[in-house]
Image (cartoon, grey):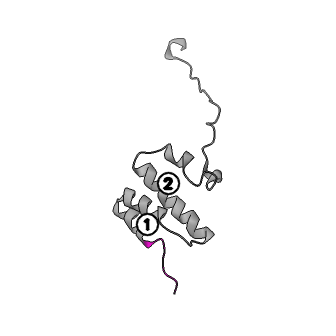
Amino acid sequence: MEPDLLFTVRNNFYLGSYQHAISEASDLEGLTEQEKVYRDLFVYRSYIELGSFEVSACKSCSNAFSHLQPHPPPPSRAITFPTAGRW
């Protein structure tokens, strides 16, 4: 059975110790590609919980979650209703 290298990161995240989760994640080495994705996921979620929404755009894995980048809002579809005065 392989050791769970992300245990401390995941545990700190679920306990609400987001800053510890971030610092633990930065010390991890020798991760597989899938483990790196999960590490980054917990790091970015921790930053969000801490209210640092802009940090994920400039951290070490800028292209790691390119598929999760925000999309522009859809075009406005204003719905107009007749006013009661026209009845």
Q: Name the one closer to the observer, 44 or 22.
A: 22
On the image, the x and y values in percent for residue 36 come to 57, 65
Where residue 7 sits, quadrant-wise, is: bottom left
Quarter occupied by the C terminus: top right
Mark 1 element type: helix
Determine whether label 1 and label 2 are within 8 Å by CB: no
- Mark 2, Cα crowd under 10 Å, few <14 / some 14-19 / many 20+, is many
Distance (Cα) linking label 1 and label 2 = 12 Å
Measured as percent of width and height from the top left, residue 55 is found at 50, 46
Magenta stretch bounds? 1-7
Residue 61 found in image quarter: bottom right
Question: Magenta stretch containing residue 79, yes or no?
Answer: no
Who's the residue at 44% across and 59% down the image? Answer: 22
Among numbered discs 1 and 2, the one appearing first in the sequence: 1
Identity of the residue drawn at 58% across and 23% down: 80
Q: Residue furthest top?
A: 85
Q: Which residue is mark 1?
A: 9
Residue 19: x, y in percent?
38, 56
Residue at left 53%, top 49%? 56
> Residue tagged by mark 2?
44
Residue at 50% across, 42% down: 54
Where 31 falls versus 76 (above or below)? below
Kind of residue at badge 1: Val
Sort mark 1 into few (<14), some (14-19) or many (20+) by Cα contacts within 10 Å. Answer: many
Q: Main secondary structure of the magenta part?
A: loop
Q: In the shown orientation, is residue 26 left or right of residue 60?
A: left
